Image (cartoon, helix red, strand yellow):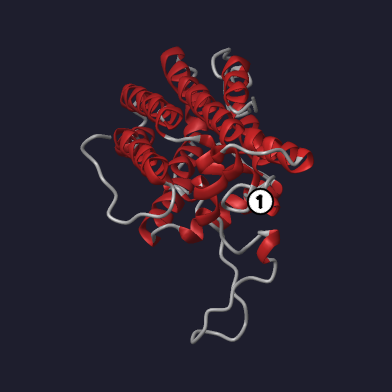
Amino acid sequence: MENLELLLSLPGGQSLRGFFLVTLLVELAAVPGLKAIIDVINGVHYNDIERVTKALDVVCQSIDSMKQALKRMHEYVDPSIFYGVIRIFLSGWKDNPSMAEGLVYEGVDDQPMEFSGGSAAQSSILHCLDELLGIQHEGNNGAFLKRMRDYMPPSHKQFIQEISICPSLRDFVLQQADERLTHAFDKCVAGLVEFRNCHINIVTRFITIPASRAKQLRANKQNLMEELDTISRAPTALEERGTGGSGIMTFLKTVRNETKDSSISVFTNGNQEPPMEEIEKSASELTIE
């Protein structure tokens, strides 16, 4: 973090810097795992159990590093600043009730255009992992994730598509019935569940709790401290939505549960809701004196 700086900035001060740089560190932590995906695919192609197992171990380690990087969001970003300032600039004009008709780009088109805001669902990493592990996202959530691929660099989108048409890794693991291979596969799935639990925890602290507090503040019409005033002035239309426009908590929990379903064996790690003590600690930090 100390060796990085933003080229461009928006309102939000050090919390904005922290938000973007922590996100960057998550992407950086994914690099070994993304490279190992090629080894997994080649190992399946050549029926090489050892190669697939070793590559999956690298993928699992990478997912854990991503989770550890994501946790640093708690250290570098103030929830009230994220909710009341930063999130407004990340939100787009599709599925945004406050801009229901989209935005007119003068000199481009007379008709309003709709674009989603910046979203973690636009990151290529998790899409690659989902396709590799055979994780299926259905219905509106699946459609939303597929639409988010239109916001990726074309080469990223193509890479995800290439992974999706390769022979099924999950079927390969089931056919081989090798204990080490099965364990390596399920560790990757469990790690991805843990990562998504961590994301749910962050959304709880940075969106759900501030949104609840904002409702209380508006209802009580209290004299507000500066940081809580920031929360209370956030657009009410965005209270239940992520920056990409999804119904955030329902979406994230469904995606997390669909990830669990791809496990071959029963794993206990990663199958719990986000730790309540962390959520309660977050809530206490936002309590009005």
| Residue 121 is at least partly visible in this image | yes
Mark 1: few/some/many CA within 10 Å (<14, 14-19, 20+): many
Q: Is mark 1 on a helix, strand or loop?
A: helix
Residue 176 lies left or right of residue 110; in this view the side is left
- 68 or 235: which is nearer to us? 235
Which residue position is annotated with label 1? 238
Q: How many numbered discs? A: 1
Residue drawn at (54%, 14%), measured in percent from left and top? 269
Q: Where is residue 9 in the image (x, y as percent from the top left)?
A: 35, 54
Name the residue type under label 1.
Leu
| Residue 39 is at least partly visible in this image | no
Whether residue 230 is situated above or below residue 64 in the rendered picture: below
Residue drawn at (64%, 26%), measured in percent from left and top? 287
Residue 91 lies left or right of residue 54; in this view the side is right
Single out the residue that lies furthest toward the right. 219
Residue 218 lies left or right of residue 289; in this view the side is right
Whether residue 161 is situated above or below residue 285 in the rendered picture: below
- 146 or 23: which is nearer to us? 23
User: Toward which corner of the image does residue 3 lie, by quadrant?
Assistant: top left
Q: Where is residue 197 in the image (x, y as percent from the top left)?
A: 56, 27
